[in-house]
Every structure is written in structure tokens, then in C-alpha cells.
Image (cartoon, rainbow, N blue to C red):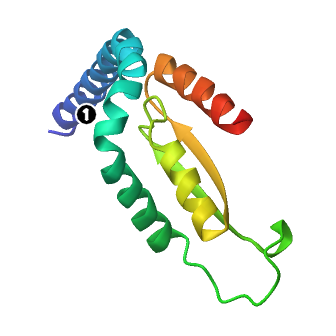
Amino acid sequence: TTGGSSNSLVLLIKNEEEHLRHQQGVFDSISGWFADRDKEVTPALEPIYQAMARDLLTNLCPKKDNNDNDDDEGQEECHILDVACGTGVLWEFLLEAANERKVRLSITGVDLSPAMVEYASERAKELLLS
């Protein structure tokens, strides 16, 4: 019946919302662990992160032939939406690859966990100051 399918849809949405709240709580509670370990894990994974960042920029931000000078006005722009960004651990490598390719990069990070976003925001501030 129509009423039965409507009720199961409401139940599905309710369960999904409960699941998302649970996941948010889990990731909020472990966000500090991730942030603390990013610096330890990163050196071991650095070559993988570097290769992944280069490949992403090559595919997402193809460099156009441009005979202009290397000044900022002649740079290509690339915008990346990092969904489930966590602590933003990949951003350093994306920025490094963008600098190598002389591409101006803009990254927007989103995550279910507000605590992860807070760590990512702190990382972004540090990267912009370095």
C-alpha cells in the first residue's frame, strides 16, 4: 500500500539521520587522534600522496598552452572540492603539485565532522602562512 511505502521511507530517512549523527560523533571523537598522527604517518606515505596530488591536478586542472610570462596573472586557476576532507592532510601535497605546475589552486574542504573541519582549518592557516 501507499501508506506502507511512505512509512518505510520515513523510517529509512530517520535511520539515515541517526546513522549520520552517530558517524559525526565517532569522527568528532577521533579527530584529535588523526590530527596528531598526520605528521607521523605522512612521511611514510609522502611519495604516494605526492603522486596522487600530481595525478589529480593533471587530470582535474589541465594546463593550457600559454606563452605568457610566469607571473600570477598568466597562471591557470583550479578549484577543488575535497569532500570528506578530514584534517586536510592532502592539501599540502596538492599545493606543492600546483606550485610545480604553476597553477593557482583553491581548495574547499567539507566534512561531516565539525571537529575534523576545525583541524583542517588550522592546517589551512598554517599552510597559507608557510
Residue 83 on image: x %, y %: 45, 43
Q: Which residue is mark 1?
A: 9
Residue 32: image quadrant is: top left
Q: Residue sitting at 47 percent across and 22 percent down?
A: 116
Residue 80 on image: x %, y %: 56, 55
Residues 38 and 12: in front is 38
Q: Residues within 10 Å of mark 1 (few under 14, many from 20)?
A: few
Tag count: 1
Task: Decide: is 32 above or below 129.
Answer: above
Residue 48 on image: x %, y %: 31, 52
Task: Decide: is 94 above or below 122.
Answer: below
Task: Decide: is 42 above or below 73.
Answer: above
With 29 as the anchor, is 129 left or right in this view? right
Residue 78: image quadrant is: bottom right
Residue 19: image quadrant is: top left
Q: Residue furthest front?
A: 43
Amino acid, disc 1: Leu
